[in-house]
Amino acid sequence: MPRKRNKPELKSCVCAANIFRKLKENGPLTSHELKRGLEKFSEKSFYRALSCLKGLGLIREREDGKYELIERWQIFLDEEGYKIKLKHSKELLRRFIEQSDLLPPSESDLRNEYLLQHLKSGYPEIYSKYEKWQKNEEKMYYYIYKEEIEKLALKVKHGEPLKGYCELCPRVEIKKLAEHRES
């Protein structure tokens, strides 16, 4: 005998699909912006759907209060592993995150070998822009690549560690695994 669907669960599923669609079409939005156009759903259904999407790892709430889709999953052993990876990411992109007039990002910051390793393994579309810049040595490609790095730095600033890996990453993860096993 088929199981009867619980109407509130079904409403939350439909609401979740609408939230996901809105984030996909519009990019990061606050909960207030997400609710706009979804008035037919109760507050309870809306927040149940939001919680479900967060719990499944499909969306996340940024430090600025906006929700965004998580395009590629990153799995960490625990919160400490996430913090280590985020700190490492912020170090690699420090000059872009701080945006100081006294120490602006330089071309050498854009050529940082560890950043490039992350780009090659986690952001092949950005790495190809770097290769075009190196191959053509034209300023136009430099500005395109720099703009992509600035967007990436903004994501890191808002709590999203870099995807991919570099020579420094395994040491961090191995050290964390050893500490995790000892406890």
Image (tube, rainbow, N blue to C red):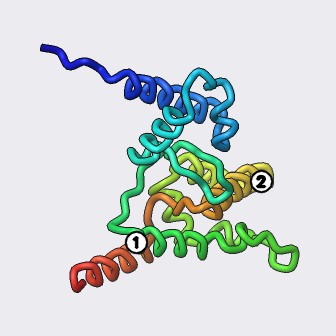
Q: Could you tell me how far apart the alpha carbons at marks 1 and 2 are, in whole angstroms? A: 33 Å
Point out the residue furthest to the right here.
Answer: 101
Question: Which of marks 2 and 1 precedes in the sequence?
Answer: 1
**Where 97 sits versus 141, above or below?**
below
**Where 33 sits versus 41, above or below?**
below
Which of the pair 170/144 is nearer the observer? 170
Dot 1: few (<14), some (14–19), or many (≥20) neighbours within 10 Å? some
Q: Are marks 1 and 2 in contact (CB under 8 Å)?
A: no
Res 134 seen here: no
Residue 159 marker: none
Residue 92 is left or right of residue 166, and the answer is right
Dot 2: few (<14), some (14–19), or many (≥20) neighbours within 10 Å? few
Disc 1 versus disc 2: nearer the observer: 1
Residue 81 marker: 1
**Where 174 sits versus 123, above or below?**
below
Residue at the image position 43 percent from the left and 65 percent from the top? 165
The residue that label 2 is drawn on is: 143
Of helix, strand and loop, which one carries label 2? helix
> What is the total number of numbered labels drawn onto the structure image?
2
Residue 179 is situated, as x and y percent measured from the top left of the image, at 29, 84
Image quadrant assignment for residue 43:
top right
